[in-house]
């Protein structure tokens, strides 16, 4: 009789955790998904084409237009007022021979779709609980639930966020750097639609970004000093709308709130290794960035894709197979996590840099991208996470 309750336990009920649970079950493992209830996620995720391709290949979505909105252009406007300013730049997917760079999805409907797929998998058991603790036990791991009951499995997937219990229990080292900036997000109704163009106004403390959400609607992500955003939120809807009109340079006519505004603190988190001893980390358990360059969930889905690839090549008839999977997964993720972390950190710092040499480098870089098609194509590939 097996000492284990399942082949794998996945902990974390967000988009990355649910996608991971589905991928593990689709690989043929008897899987338990611990997914504690959470308030609806009112944010959106801009998923680049490789991520959308993965979702379709894994059967997580059908046609992307049924849930999302195409992103065919990215327009960058330097609104810093600095001595050395970057040119206005437009990136068009057609230049790369693409219909779109990606698609903007509302997180809550996307998660509902994932749940619908999960419900079709007979080897995936979903429990609306979190984990209270995690301990190594022989060749596997024992998860203690909030009611004191325990579950055991050789493989544990931690997708339980920045404060990951799984990461801490497995001794996987992490470093986190908080920023003075936060992000304010909400939905807006615009007097003039932005079509399928994501528009970024770059200000000294961070970008003010409008992402297409269909018809006249746009998703706003405004990054600024935390106290600035808290004060703006405290001023009420009319105060916010006046600020939005100013920040968007009054380019879109009247602006109305289509949802309440929520402010999130920003930090960057990274791990030395994303897996060891039968534990793997996915999503924000392994990495977190400011919402720059649309990398968050895109990177999390690349985690899931690499986990699926590691499981596909594993020999589960051999002792210690889960440890072999975690080592293979960590190896697969190392370069991508380091490359993406460096890219996002460099981009975020360049947006905030006050020194004239840094301003000149950033402006020169955008001029080069504006004038050199080959460089633009390379930037497209990097930004979309092509490997």
Image: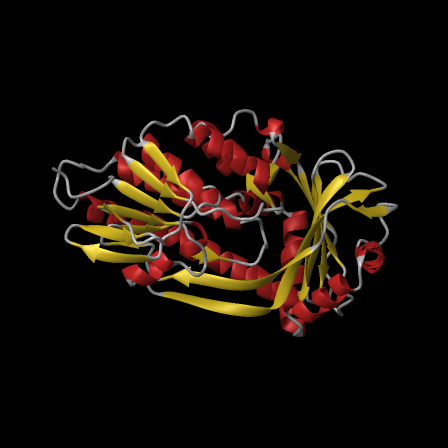
Q: Is residue 367 left or right of residue 265?
A: right
Q: Residue at x 80, y 38 (%)?
A: 193
Position of residue 270 relative to residue 50, above or below, is: below
Q: Is residue 87 left or right of residue 162?
A: right
Residue 51 percent across, percent down from the top left:
49, 38
Identify the residue at the far bottom of this view: 355
- Dividing the picture into quadrants, the one containing residue 376 is top right
Q: Which of the two residues, 275 or 239, is positioned nearer the viewer here?
A: 239
Q: Which of the two residues, 202 or 222, is positioned nearer the viewer here?
A: 222
Q: Residue at x 75, y 40 (%)?
A: 217
Q: Which of the two residues, 337 or 141, is positioned nearer the viewer here?
A: 141
Q: Which of the two residues, 79 or 315, is positioned nearer the viewer here?
A: 315
Q: Is residue 39 left or right of residue 333?
A: right
Residue 85 percent across, percent down from the top left:
74, 63
- Dividing the picture into quadrants, the one containing residue 271 is bottom left
Q: Residue at x 78, y 37 (%)?
A: 216
The answer to whether residue 139 shows anywhere in this view is yes
The answer to whether residue 49 shows anywhere in this view is no
Residue 210 percent across, percent down from the top left:
72, 48
Look at the image and tell me in which quarter the N terminus lies. top left
Q: How is the image coloured?
A: secondary structure
Q: Is residue 188 left or right of residue 346?
A: right
Residue 114 percent across, percent down from the top left:
48, 34
- Dividing the picture into quadrants, the one containing residue 317 is top left
Q: How many marks?
A: 0
Look at the image and tell me in which quarter the C terminus lies. top left
């Amino acid at each position: 009789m097996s000492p284990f309750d399942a082949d794998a336990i996945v902990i974390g009920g967000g988009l990355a955790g649910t996608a991971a649970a589905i991928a593990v079950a689709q690989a043929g493992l008897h899987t338990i998904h611990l997914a504690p209830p959470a308030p609806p996620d009112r944010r959106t995720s801009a998923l680049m084409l490789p991520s959308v391709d993965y979702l379709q290949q894994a059967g997580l979505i059908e046609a992307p237009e049924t849930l999302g909105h195409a992103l065919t252009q990215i327009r960058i406007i330097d609104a810093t007022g600095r001595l050395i300013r970057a040119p206005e730049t437009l990136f068009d997917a057609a230049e790369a021979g693409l219909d779109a760079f990606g698609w903007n999805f509302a997180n809550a409907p996307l998660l509902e779709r994932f749940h619908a797929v999960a419900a079709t998998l007979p080897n995936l058991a979903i429990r609306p609980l979190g984990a209270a603790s995690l301990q190594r036990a022989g060749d596997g791991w024992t998860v203690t639930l909030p009611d004191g009951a325990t579950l055991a499995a050789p493989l544990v997937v931690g997708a339980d966020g920045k404060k990951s219990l799984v990461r801490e229990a497995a001794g996987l080292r992490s470093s986190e750097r908080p920023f003075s900036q936060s992000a304010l997000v909400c939905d807006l109704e615009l007097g003039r639609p932005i079509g399928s163009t994501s528009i970024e106004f770059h200000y000294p403390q961070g970008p003010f970004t409008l992402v297409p959400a269909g018809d006249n609607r746009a998703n706003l992500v405004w990054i600024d000093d935390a106290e600035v955003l808290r004060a703006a939120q405290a001023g009420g809807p009319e105060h916010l709308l006046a600020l939005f009109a100013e920040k968007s340079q009054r380019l879109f006519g009247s602006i109305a709130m289509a949802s309440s505004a929520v402010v999130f603190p920003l930090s960057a988190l990274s791990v030395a290794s994303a897996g060891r001893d039968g534990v793997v980390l996915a999503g924000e358990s392994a990495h977190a960035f400011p919402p720059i360059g649309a990398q968050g969930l895109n990177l999390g889905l690349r985690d899931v894709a690499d986990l699926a690839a590691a499981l596909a090549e594993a020999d589960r008839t051999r002792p210690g197979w889960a440890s072999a999977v975690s080592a293979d997964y960590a190896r697969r993720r190392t370069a991508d996590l380091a490359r993406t972390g460096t890219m996002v950190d460099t981009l975020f710092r360049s947006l905030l840099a006050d020194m004239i040499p840094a301003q000149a480098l950033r402006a020169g870089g955008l001029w080069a991208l504006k004038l050199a098609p080959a460089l633009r194509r390379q930037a497209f590939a990097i930004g979309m996470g092509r490997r």
